[in-house]
Image: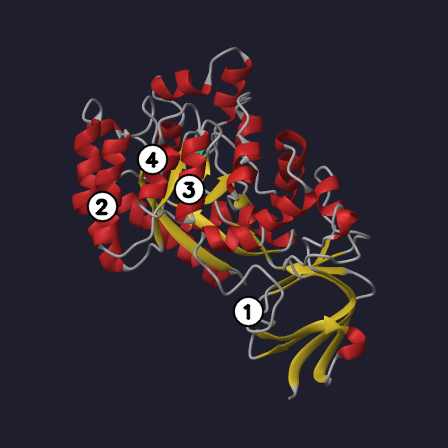
Amino acid sequence: MSFDRVWLDANLATMIPRAGGATMPRGDDPLGIIEDGAIASKDGRIAWVGRRADLPSSAASVTRCDGAWILPGLIDCHTHLVFAGDRAREFEMRLEGASYEEIAKAGGGILSTVRATRAATEQALIDSALPRLDELLAQGVTTVEIKSGYGLDLETEARMLRAARALGRRRDVAVTTTLLAAHAVPPEYQGHRADFARHVADAILPAIAAEGIADAVDAFTDSAIGFTPAETEAVFLAARALGLPVKLHADQLRDDAGAGLAARFGALSADHIEYASATGIEAMARAGTVGVLLPGAYYFIRETHLPDIAAMRAAGLRMALATDCNPGSCPSPNLLLMLNLGCTLFRLTVAEALAGVTTHAAAALGLPDRGALAPGLRCDLSLFAINRPAELCYWLGRNPCIGRIVVGQ
Ligand code: NIG
Ligand code: FE
């Protein structure tokens, strides 16, 4: 067969674990490494992966990679990339002693971004998000999830999702969109939280589904500043009726049994989960719900309660890592930094962290066609000038990405 493109002189981290490999300590090879490897593409898919010496045929276009490392295109599976304004003033207030929760309760926090986002045009939302998106792309990101959640009314939620979709047309990147209308209680529903959850379920969700601008539905379950499990269920039932998969901001600030709720609904992922109980974690693993860890938010709001990584490992939970890029709890479009924070703060291994931005991130988005280097998958690649994959987790805020291929281009 003839290939469209071939990449040579590269080391590959296929992200398909192999037992008994020779390249890693303890004899296993969780990254599925192929040294002196080659990858070939055909019609935007990976057509062949292996050792260069075994490459069966050549291609019209051959790229020599000078010993660079190729990984699957990185996936940021949890972002709030689209928003207006910033919350630097709130950051100052926190430095003067206020807590994230106190600021939220005083009408700041998420609601201050809601005011700014409601006042912004779709074009303004696109323009302010583009530089953030470009930072992610420069690091080798080829798929990014973008949530709404700063509109809290149909008009603005829809505008945010349209802006997110437009970003995917403005740049070479796959964008998936998630409706997060149940993110906070908007001013016009203050004191009527359950009514707003119903409004999300009965009015906002069906309208967004009819327009076809959301790939999934998310909610913020938190008994103090988000929604109760019962209110969240109303939203999830509506999503299920419309055939939309669900995700959940769960157990970020306290254990509200969010992990178990996400599992019961077969959620694609439950995210944050610092306070998730071992029982909740086990339920997630059984349901196939991915645990998305957000160490940047943990760091930025100076959380001290660590997610129970030992319980996650024991349960065999698939763990993903994402930026959570948002103006309040993690103003950072830097996925490579999250690799370092995941390892440093949560003590993830290099293999766990890298799976978190590739295979497991793909699972968190319900996208089995990407996240690894294997024939048949989308040819999304990220190239790095590094000597070993651990460098991707080791550098603190340095970007060794030298190339990015999306659908073979
Ligand atoms: O993922 N937890 C809720 N939502 C966001 C923060 C949003 C904000 O503060 O603007 C999060 O951390
Ligand atoms: Fe978030």
Which residue: 49% across, 41% down?
A: 292
66 sits to left or right of 116: right
Give residue 105's position: percent from left, percent from top. Answer: 35, 18
The amino acid type of the residue labelled 2 equals: Leu
Which is nearer the N-term, disc 3 or disc 1? 3
Tell me the residue that label 4 is attached to. 183
Does mark 1 have its CB less than 8 Å from ligand 2?
no
Tell me the residue that label 1 is attached to. 377
Labelled disc at residue 237: 2
Does mark 4 have its CB less than 8 Å from ligand 1?
yes
Which is nearer the N-term, disc 4 or disc 2? 4
Which is nearer the N-term, disc 1 or disc 2? 2
Which of the two marks, 3 or 2, is nearer to us in this view?
3
Tell me the residue that label 3 is attached to. 284
Which of the two marks, 4 or 2, is nearer to us in this view?
2
Does mark 3 have its CB less than 8 Å from ligand 2?
no
Which residue: 25% across, 38% down?
A: 233
Which of the two marks, 3 or 1, is nearer to us in this view?
3
Label 4 secondary element: loop
Instruction: Give the alpha-carbon distance from disc 1 to disc 4, as whole Å.
Output: 34 Å
Label 1 secondary element: loop
